[in-house]
Amino acid sequence: MTLEDNSIKEHASGSDSKEGTLIEEKVIENVGFFDRVTKHLGQYGVEERGVERVPEDQRTDKSLFSLASIWFSANLSIPTFAFGCVAVPIFGLGFVDTAFLVIFVNAVAAIPPCFFASFGPKFGVRQMLLSRFFFGYHVMKLLATLQIIVCLGWASVNAIVGAQLFQAVNPDIPGWAGILVIALSTLIVCFIGYKAIHLYERWAAVPAGIIYLIVLGVFAHSGKFDSLLPLKTGPTEKAGLLSYSAGLFGFTCGWSVFAADYGVYQPATKSPKSVFIWSFGGLYIPIVFLELFGAAVGTAIVNDEGYRVAYENYSIGGLLSQVLVPELGGFGKFCIVILAMSIVAGNCPNIYSSAFAIQVLGKATMRVPRFFWTIFGTAIYVAIAIPGYERFETWLENIVLITGYWVSLYTGIALVEHFLFRRGYDGYRIEDVNNPKALPPGFASLAGFGLGAFGVVMGMSQVWWTGPISKAAGGGDMGFEMGLGFSMVSYAGFRAIEKSYMKR
């Protein structure tokens, strides 16, 4: 079924708004060239469907394991390990306090994305399209823009990590070449679409998992791990704990904004509880394992000159090289290359979902097929990653904190709307997803988002700004906590007024 057929069928089935009908007709008119290309590529297995809803009779993915594997492989990747490593040199933490935060903060941060994952099978709608029920038809476009920025930012960080690993194996490999290898490999999988991504993610964890166990064994045998690394005390320790907690939250909860995308081909009969449990296991287990492992390796930077120099010269790639190559030689280098390629699994969700966020921006972008936006997004993040190659730690710290900021606002508003005003899944008329007059007006969500952003500013701690609440906490970042609280409380009040007067 083509983009045009789907859009006509979608709208004819439910929208009672003349304005909504006109919007959809304008979206699909004159598809011409794009429609022909979509049909042609569909013959070779490329996913034709874009952001529009997946009808029940086309949902052929029935495996709960695929819901877990998408998150397992995406997070059994070097960026997860890297964020564990930087707890020591960047945030000034020891292994004990890092481990405590990793276990407990991730347990909380994994709840929202796993909950939103249940919306995919329930409604067959992508996360950004679903967001119209939370934010309204027009305000949702602001959210889509933020998602595009964060997805491409994460993709660039991931590509930089992969390039660093290639350079650690062979210093003659330029950074831009490694970035292109990661980017083009990711593009191939994402260009094909949903089935290719799930197939790739199902198996990508196998070689990566084996290599990580090898790294773990070699590092444990080296005796470089220091579980009792002296901890900082007072305001300095408090600031590090708060800032790293914010980063952990952003890293894990960041999947919330496209969690539903990877279950839209699952039947609506799937139990939301089962979807949540399988998704939680697939998300939480690899994140906790690799962040703890990364923090353990990070302790060696403090006590071992070789590790410190390797980290300063080649960052995360240098650390892994220091662990593997002295003991395993050429096979150690081979292991590093495999780990570099595991980044493709982590990048696929960012690039695949960013295309849907672009499509929902307007009728012009929706007219362009998903796979064209996949190519466009790839070009953008490569252009970002190449000049940012030498500033990896700064990029990583900033992107995880920014993700935590805006995702806290998104999550706060969406959860309040779902539980307080819609009272669960039965409160959605999914056929109204394309009908602006049947969706929330968006005034409450805009106000809640704005006040949530004010809370973020009050609590954030960045090089260019430290909020008064952060200063009172010793300089630790409390942006996501303040943003979450401000957005939930303010949205609840504004939405009650909005719904009372506007009846939708």
Image (cartoon, rainbow, N blue to C red):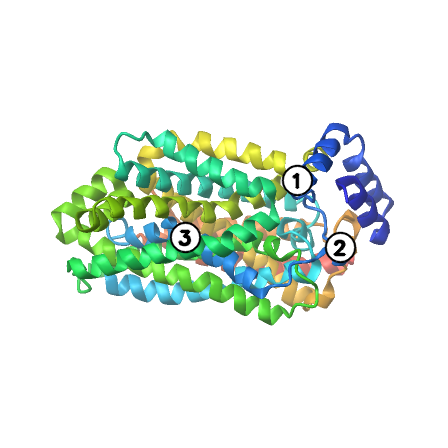
The answer to whether residue 389 is above or below residue 456 is above
> x and y percent of residue 282 in the render?
48, 63
- Sort mark 1 into few (<14), some (14-19) or many (20+) by Cα contacts within 10 Å: few
Crowding at mark 2 (Cα within 10 Å: few <14, some 14-19, many 20+): some
Q: How far apart are labels 2 and 1 at the CA level?
A: 22 Å
Classify 10 Å Cα crowding around label 3: few (below 14), some (14-19), many (20 and above).
Answer: many
Q: How many marks?
A: 3
Mark whose residue sits in front, 2 or 1: 1
Which residue matches tag 3? 459
Quick check: 159 left or right of 117?
A: left
Residue type of the residue flagged with mark 1: Tyr
**How far separated are the C-alphas under marks 1 and 3?**
51 Å
Q: Residue at x 60, y 63 (%)?
A: 63
Mark 3 vs mark 2: which is more N-terminal? 2
- Earlier in the chain: of badge 2 and badge 1, it is 1
Task: Say if mark 2 contacts mark 1, CB within 8 Å.
Answer: no
- Name the quadrant of the C terminus: bottom right
Where residue 330 sits in the image (x, y, percent)? 24, 44
User: From what the image shows, is residue 308 above or below residue 242?
Assistant: above
The quarter holding residue 413 reads bottom right
Quadrant (top left, top right, bottom left, bottom right) of the N terminus: top right
Q: Secondary structure at mark 2?
A: loop
- Disc 2 residue type? Pro
Q: Amino acid at mark 3?
A: Gly
Identify the element where label 3 is drawn: helix
Measure how far apart labels 3 and 2 are at the Cα level: 43 Å
Observer-nearest of 91 and 116? 116
